[in-house]
Amino acid sequence: MQGNNHDDVRRHNLSVILRLVHRGGAASRAELTRVTGLNRSTVAALVGELAELGLVEERGPGATNQVGRPSMMVAGSDRVLALAVNPEIDAVTIGLVGFGGTVRRRIRHPLAESPSAAGVVEITTALLERMRSELPPIARVTGIGVAVPGLVRAHDGLVRHAPHLGWIDEPLAEMLEAATGLPVFAANDASTGVQAERHFGAGRGLTDLIYLNGGASGIGGGLVVGGAPVGGVAGYAGEFGHMRVGSGTATDSAGIAGTLEAEVTRRPLLDILGLDRPDPDEFERALLSSASPELRDEVHRQQEHLAIALAGAVNILNPQLVVLGGFLASLYNADPGRLRSAVGRFTLREPFDTVRICPAELGSNLLITGAAELVFERLLDDPAGFLLR
């Protein structure tokens, strides 16, 4: 165990137990003893301390195949919640998320025009108060995580550039913390998405995966390599949307022509479908139910460009899994076999043979789950230092 003294070891062990319960779900003391290698009395003491902190609960015995009286199950407390925020050009989505990545409530607040950072703070504060009024008295919102469609500085949550929102150097985390009194953590939306899918979705148990997210604000990505998230020196890694995939003249949000973000966009799909600002689930239902030849041709055109970007990523990184979220998941679902075949044409055989491509398992809850994980990660790192507000 890590640490230079007894207190350091205890804090580390508390973190290990809580992380197992959060990421793996309810577990018996016997199972926690087996997985951690700690003795039974140590696990009992750690569970007791986490319960006193209000972070776990012991519930009725679960079914087991073992002889004898079954153990009580240790589960994350229902009272501990994180608020998650995802601003976009057409809506601000806010959710309450509990342990285990469970989305308890989600509200999509549609907008007629792109919000300012101050507008997002105002909307979030109002919706937070509304949600709090509906919670039982013992429930506590422990912090706010924000998934931003743009470049976010890792150490302080400063939004350096969110081009579709028109934000430059917006101290969103600082503003939201001042307005709510809660700790706030912000990161790029796709970077939060890859963590959500890694821990609670299709990437569970994997060490090398790529996530690409397509939203109203363009395309971004997240990476996990060798079991570790890849953020780059300042947290800006994963900008797959700016990879050049063709010779077209259309430009992306950075003014670069022929990129994935320039060629693969939601707008022409919406125009063909006759939709304006649908939520992600409504968009996918309309896309998959349409028999329009024009829509089919546009889907296939976009799939070709997406395949070039995916092939480049697979050739360079050799991942186990590529996960597609947002409208990119809908593009995949429109013709999965065609997209995989197109990726295969541009990929070396060996890495292509071992990679799986799939839509995000968490669906429209993915970015909310990922944003909440920004909050839970701090709690998991030091449960003993956490103050339940």
Image: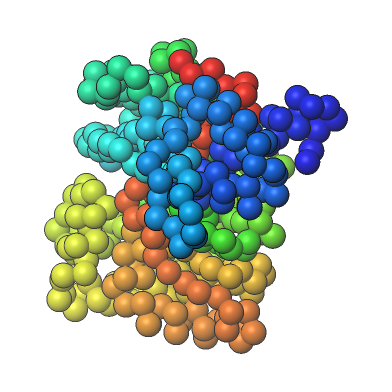
Which residue of the protein is positioned furthest toward the right in this rendering? Answer: 4
Front-most of residues 127 and 98: 98
Q: Can residue 257 be seen in this view?
A: no
Question: Does 228 appear above or below 79?
Answer: below
Front-most of residues 36 and 334: 36
Q: What residue is rendered at 34% in x and 41% in y?
A: 103
Which residue of the protein is positioned furthest toward the front in this rendering? Answer: 68
Question: Does 77 appear above or below 312?
Answer: above
Front-most of residues 130 and 24: 24
User: Residue 31: percent from the left, percent from the top?
Assistant: 56, 51
In the rendered picture of this protein, how many numbered marks are placed on residues? Answer: 0
The N terminus lies in quadrant: top right
User: Residue 246: percent from the left, percent from the top?
Assistant: 50, 71
Q: What residue is rendered at 27% in x and 52% in y?
A: 280
Q: What residue is rendered at 19% in x and 78% in y?
A: 293
Q: How are the colours assigned in the image?
A: rainbow
Where on the picture, by quarter, is residue 225? bottom right
Q: What residue is rendered at 69% in x and 29% in y?
A: 11
Question: Does 347 appear above or below 274?
Answer: below
Question: Does 199 appear above or below 10?
Answer: below
Front-most of residues 49 and 329: 49
User: Residue 235: percent from the left, percent from the top?
Assistant: 63, 41
Q: In this view, does 372 lie to the left or right of 363?
A: right
Q: Can residue 59 be seen in this view?
A: yes
User: Residue 51: percent from the left, percent from the top?
Assistant: 50, 27
Q: In this view, does 155 lie to the left or right of 321?
A: right
Where on the picture, by quarter, is residue 50? top right
Q: Is residue 61 left or right of residue 254?
A: left
